[in-house]
Image: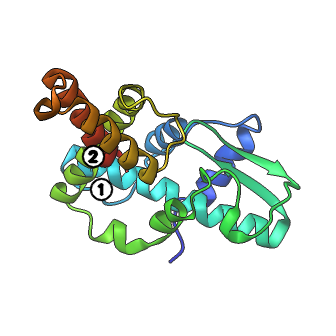
């Protein structure tokens, strides 16, 4: 399905060759009355605006590269046209946070059509939980005396070693043992 925002986005991107933010694009399209048939609920309507813009951007990214060898860089804080950017494959297009699943999500119209107040709330809650877990990850790694790039296997092995050392039944400190367990649970939740 062709996104009705593609043409307005091309115009907006031409006007801002140095790049812009998604927020700027949404604001400009909103001011122009370009968002059709939005939900009455403000959170769901905001999700719909975001989805429509991201969908149009990712469609445009693929089309511009395939047809013109012009690359549309898309990140959370910057969207801009970059002529002649070398690309290894469609799966590794730069500017998608290295994650094709993000692009795939926004190119799937089913995610837009099935969005509800409840599903958007669940999506936002999931995001904030992951965000909070990510902030706590560094602290948890410090408690377990692990490097930032520790694998799940390393985390598990180190937790077991330290938990065995600090277990109250083996003469260890119960507060330290609880801190180790909390750190381990935080790292498991962040995976």
Q: Is residue 172 left or right of residue 53?
A: left
Residue that sits furthest to the bottom in the current view = 1
Q: Earlier in the sequence, mark 2 or mark 1?
A: 1
How crowded is the residue under tag 2: few (<14 C-alpha within 10 Å), some, or many (20+)?
some
Residue 128 seen in the current view:
no
Q: Which residue is mark 1?
A: 38
Residue closer to the observer: 123 or 170? 170
Q: Which residue is mark 2?
A: 124
Q: State how far apart marks 2 and 1 are (Cα).
A: 19 Å
> Residue 71 — which label?
none
For image coordinates 17% across by 55% down, the residue present is: 117
Residue 159 seen in the current view:
yes
**Position of residue 30 measured from the top left corner of the image (x, y, whole percent):** 43, 43
Residue closer to the observer: 47 or 85? 85
Callout 1: helix, strand or loop? loop
For image coordinates 50% across by 43% down, the residue present is: 150
**Position of residue 82 measured from the top left corner of the image (x, y, whole percent):** 80, 48
Against 132, residue 152 (above or below) is below
């Amino acid at each position: 399905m062709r996104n009705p925002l593609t043409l307005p986005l091309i115009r907006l991107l031409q006007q801002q060759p140095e790049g812009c933010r998604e927020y700027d694009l949404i604001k400009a399209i909103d001011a122009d009355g370009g968002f059709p048939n939005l939900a009455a609920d403000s959170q769901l309507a905001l999700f719909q605006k975001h989805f429509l813009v991201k969908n149009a951007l990712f469609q445009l990214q693929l089309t511009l590269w395939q047809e013109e060898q012009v690359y549309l860089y898309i990140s959370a804080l910057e969207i801009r046209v970059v002529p002649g950017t070398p690309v290894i494959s469609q799966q590794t297009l730069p500017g998608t946070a290295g994650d094709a699943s993000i692009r795939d999500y926004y190119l799937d119209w089913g995610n837009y059509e099935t969005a509800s107040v409840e599903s958007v709330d669940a999506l936002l809650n999931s995001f904030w939980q992951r965000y909070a877990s990510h902030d706590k990850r560094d602290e948890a790694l410090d408690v377990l005396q692990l490097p930032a790039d520790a694998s799940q296997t390393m985390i598990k092995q180190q937790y077991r070693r330290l938990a065995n050392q600090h277990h109250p039944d083996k003469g260890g400190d119960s507060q330290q043992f609880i801190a180790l367990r909390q750190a381990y649970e935080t790292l498991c939740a962040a995976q």
